[in-house]
Amino acid sequence: MTSRAESGSRVRRTGAAAQVAGSQIGLALSNYLVLAIAARHLDTAGFAALSSYYLLINTVGRGLFAAVELEATRAVADAVARGHDTAPAVRAARNDTLRLLVVALALSAVAGPLLLGQALGSATLAIGMLAAGAVTMAASYLLRGPLAGRRRYGLYAATFWIEALVGLAVAAVFVIVDVQGIAWWVAILALAPIVSALVLARPATRMPAAPADGAAVVPAAARGGVFWSAALLLAGQGVWNLAAVFVTSRLADTPAIAAGFVTVAVILRAPVLLFPAVQALLLPSFTAMLGDGDHSGVRTIVRRLGLVLAGGGVVWLALSVFVVPWAARLLFGATVVPPAWVLLVLALSTVVGAAAQIGQTRLVAERRPAAVAVAWIVGLALLVVVAYLLAPPVAAAAIGQLAAAVAVFVLLAVAARRTPDPGATS
């Protein structure tokens, strides 16, 4: 019979999961709305530049600093569970953030030229905007990790809601006062993350640790530390974001075509936003089952998820052809939409990516982050070679993204097959 304490703990965990997932989805929708508002207010070149910035800062900023959040969550939660001081874990997170910030600034200098030839124009301005976004995201993720580790999910969720609402509010003001300068619109995405850090920094330091009857919603980083996790997340973000950036960079002279591609690419990458939630849900179960040696149970779950994904994938492919062009024109004002085969290739890449995410979760549960990171790095390298170097740009970008997703899926599948399985020899 389930005790009242166990039932209450389950309710608290469900509520925490809803808070965290809802806030992250809210921020994603807010960013999409800002892009949709900008698409209706700016010219096509301005929208293409803003969209490229959004994708680049998600790659450089969120891709790197989400790893700090994961490791800080693990370290702070462990300190709380043991009754230890959390200050050393927070200091370690701060040091990791500073090291990764150096990497982010270097990547900003490399990626800045991809925004040239578009509405931003100046190399200094493009690099400066990316660097500013990296700094603000570093601050926001450094705040979130200890909050999640202390199980203060209300404040944790508030960091996302504040960022989301600030972005929407400023975008609305810009429309009212008719702000046309693309740099001002880019500033929304660059500076919004710092607001939550400024507003919640003091309340966060005052919050005591929660009782240890809850469960962390954000999965902990696997063995190998924050840097393997950062490499994995950075490369993964790059696979899903950079194809459209390469198109806007290479088609600066035809912004309508570039804007059309980036619009459908942004829409068709929407399932990618759910990948972290999928891993957060699967990781505890996979970890527990593999810890008990239940490899057959993991395989059963993977097969069932594969069947669900196959059915959902067919629906997603149909939506990509029959609904996405309509949404691109209605919501984002796209005047040129890529041909149907390009939409199908982009949609198929996200389906393959979802399948790869299941394999990734299994390997993370086995504490093999290096194998996962290497797979995503190889996929990213393949995307860069195909999407940035081959022609024509739109076809190369779509094919490059699918090739990258397939490469990641295959490499993760090969790595999973090399996992020792005691049940296979029994």
Image (cartoon, rainbow, N blue to C red):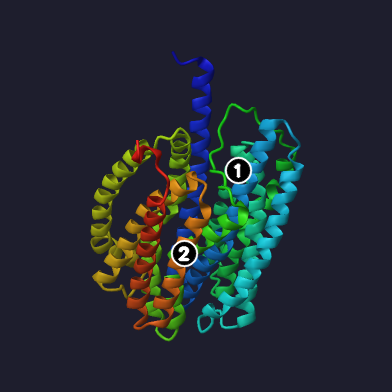
Q: Earlier in the sequence, mark 2 or mark 1?
A: 2
Local crowd size for mark 1, using a 10 Å CA cut-off: few (<14), some (14–19), many (≥20): many
Q: Quadrant of the C terminus?
A: top left
Local crowd size for mark 2, using a 10 Å CA cut-off: few (<14), some (14–19), many (≥20): many
Q: Quadrant of the N terminus?
A: top left
At a point 76% along the width and 42% down the height, the residue shown is: 87
Task: Kindly tell me whether residue 176 is visible in this rendering.
Answer: no
The residue type indicated by label 2 comes to Leu
At a point 50% along the width and 81% down the height, the residue shown is: 118
Q: Residue 305 bears which disc, if any?
A: none
Q: Secondary structure at mark 2?
A: helix
Q: Residue 35 bears which disc, if any?
A: 2
The span from disc 2 to disc 1 (Cα, nearest Å) is 25 Å
Q: Position of residue 18 (x, y in %)?
A: 48, 38
Task: Kindly tell me whether residue 167 is visible in this rendering.
Answer: yes
Q: Which residue is mark 1?
A: 156
The residue type indicated by label 1 comes to Tyr
Q: Choose between 344 and 195: the one closer to the eye.
A: 344
